[in-house]
Amino acid sequence: MKKLLTLFLLTLLSSAVLNAQNQNEPLLNDMRDRLKSESFNVGLLLQSTANFSFDDDNFLGGRGFGIGVSRLKFNGLVDQSFSYNFQLEFTRNRSLIDLALGYHHSEQFVLEVGIMKPDIGLDLQPNPGDTDFIDRSRIIGAMLNSREIGISASGQFEAIDYNIAIYNGYGIRRFDNDNRFMYLAKLGYTANLEDDASLYVGGNMAFNSSTNELVGNTGQFSDEDRFTFGMFARYDSDIWFGAAEFLQSTFDAVLSERITGFYTTIGNKLDEKNEVLVRWDHLSFDEMDRIDNLIIFGWNHQATSVISFQVNLLGLTTKNDGDRFGLQGNFQFQF
């Protein structure tokens, strides 16, 4: 009898909390009813940013206000298990960043073709509104293109997920192609732990045989046969969360270059709306004799279900250029 009474009280409490949330955001609920469904889903992300370098230099872009990511997305499922994904970015010269058509045969096999995000780099996968910090880890920008054009097969077998893909290997430079490809493979495993905690681990690799390929944001071009591989882990629980990732890319440019990077993130969920976190971000270039270490302290606050704030305090230590410090802020709307 006591168990039934406890279950009844918990049900009433959860229902009251849900009703209170719905009553507190009536306009948002109206938007969801109109713009989100299985067949037609509209997504909107708007960010307003502020940067402040402690010294009078160009660290973090200097001092000033700016516009972060501004995106409009349409996606959904249609009849016969087909899907579409179309996304525009309004803060870049090239506005189209996603244009993919898919076939969902089953949970174990999904096929997509078009412009899409390659499934390599753990910190690349979340959209910009869901990243732990305002900016992604520097290993993502240094070694990867955020989008590629090609074909991808992915799926989930209980705790194991995979992705196998073939891309042109030039990012979204749609008219550059030398009849060679980039090949990608990724394998992940999710372990369910005690107290509703989870641990996600895996590895990935990519081989790009394309010539004259621009390597991330480094300004270097790979002559041929660039090999990238990595390992990752992400932990999540009711109170603590964290991530660690290693990525390395080797290629021939003017000299044979090897870029190595890793990061470690540890965070604490103070309550339902606030979390604090810290990251160590390492990046090194062998031939350029460059070694950087970036430490970031962050605070994330979820004001409503669509409005959030982020504040990051950064300190960069470089081998030859000394230390630099700065502060970043992000105010965002994500629907």
Image (tube, helix red, strand yellow):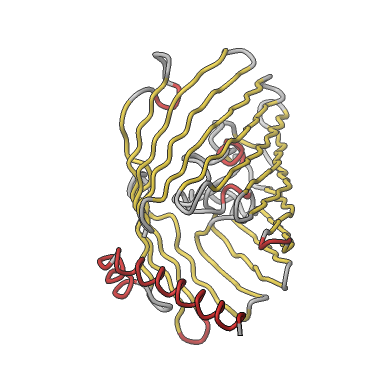
The percent coordinates of residue 285 (x first, y second) are 67, 26
- The percent coordinates of residue 189 (x first, y second) are 74, 61
Relative image position of residue 333 (x, y in whole percent): 34, 52
> Exactly how many numbered labels are in the figure?
0
User: Which one is nearer the viewer's eye here, 222 or 247?
Assistant: 247
* Corner quadrant of residue 92: top left
Vertical arrangement, residue 248 with respect to residue 324, above or below: below
Q: Is residue 149 above or below residue 104?
A: above
Which residue appears at 70% of the width and 39% of the height?
249
Q: Quadrant of the C terminus?
A: bottom left
Front residue of 73/326: it is 326
Residue at the (35%, 68%) spot, across then down: 20
Q: Residue 316, percent across and down?
A: 56, 22
Residues 112 and 244: in front is 244
The furthest residue to the left: 27
Check the image and report above or below for 211 versus 35.
above
The image shows residue 167, relative to residue 244, as above or below, that is below
Q: Quadrant of the N terminus?
A: bottom right
User: Foreground: 269 or 266?
Assistant: 269
**Residue found 36% across the figure and 66% down from its top:** 21
